[in-house]
Image (tube, grey):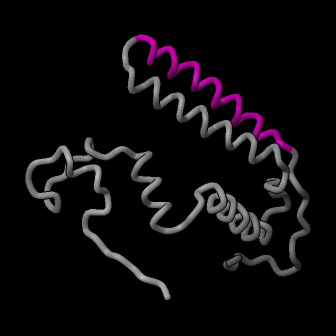
């Protein structure tokens, strides 16, 4: 048996610091995106990494219908590089929160690191794909 729970206040950490109506005027500054994302994924019982890869698989399956090349999402390097982007993004967030000149330098260096990882993703070998005789775009899920 599955039991469901609904609440208009799904982010309990926000109302600890807030005065007034939570339904009407809860400012975004009370929201920590990382905590909110974790709560969201826990509520849906979804692993974000697995879900992201599922989206890549569905998208690749759809693109096979019209493109002669596809990203090799089964290549372990692909997932490794995506994981590196997550680490770079998290480090950038920590540095930005500190502020000051260090944050500006960090923004520049993390941008370079992310750019390098994107370049490596873009230059990964692709898989050839035989196009169907009748090319049409149809849902792949």
Residue shown at 69% from the left, 79% from the top: 138
Question: Residue 56 placed where, x, y %?
Answer: 69, 60
Residue shown at 25% from the left, 50% from the top: 14
Q: Is residue 118 above or below residue 48?
A: above
Report if residue 120 lies within the magenta region.
yes
Q: Which residue is at the front of the view, 47 or 63?
A: 47
Q: Residue furthest left?
A: 20
Question: Is 73 on the left-hand or right-hand side of 54?
Answer: right
Report if residue 71 lies within the magenta region.
no
Question: Is 95 on the left-hand or right-hand side of 16?
Answer: right
- Which contiguous range is marked in magenta? 101-124
Residue shown at 70% from the left, 76% from the top: 140
The quadrant where residue 12 appears: bottom left
Residue shown at 74% from the left, 78% from the top: 136
Q: Which residue is at the front of the view, 68 or 94?
A: 94
Q: Is residue 135 above or below residue 89?
A: below
The total number of labels drawn is 0
Q: Residue furthest front?
A: 1
In terms of secondary structure, what is the magenta stretch mainly? helix
Q: Is residue 102 above or below residue 127?
A: above
Question: Residue 19 placed where, x, y %?
Answer: 10, 48
Q: Is residue 84 above or below residue 36?
A: above
Question: Is 132 on the left-hand or right-hand side of 113?
Answer: right
Q: Residue furthest bottom?
A: 1
Q: Which residue is at the front of the view, 51 or 42?
A: 42
The quadrant where residue 125 appears: top right
Question: The C terminus lies in which quarter of the figure?
Answer: bottom right
Question: Residue 93 placed where, x, y %?
Answer: 46, 31
Question: Residue 100 placed where, x, y %?
Answer: 37, 14
């Amino acid at each position: 048996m599955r039991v469901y729970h609904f609440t208009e206040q799904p982010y309990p950490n926000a109302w600890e610091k807030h005065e007034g109506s939570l339904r009407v005027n809860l400012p975004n500054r009370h929201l920590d995106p990382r905590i909110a994302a974790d709560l969201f994924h826990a509520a849906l019982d979804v692993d974000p990494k697995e879900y992201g890869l599922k989206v890549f698989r569905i998208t690749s399956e759809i693109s096979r219908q019209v493109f002669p090349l596809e990203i090799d999402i089964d290549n372990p390097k692909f997932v490794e590089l995506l994981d590196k982007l997550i680490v770079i993004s998290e480090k950038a967030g920590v540095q930005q929160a500190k502020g000051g000149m260090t944050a500006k330098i960090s923004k520049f260096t993390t941008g370079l690191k992310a750019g390098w990882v994107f370049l490596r993703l873009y230059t990964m070998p692709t898989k050839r794909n035989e196009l169907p005789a009748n090319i049409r775009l149809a849902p792949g899920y």
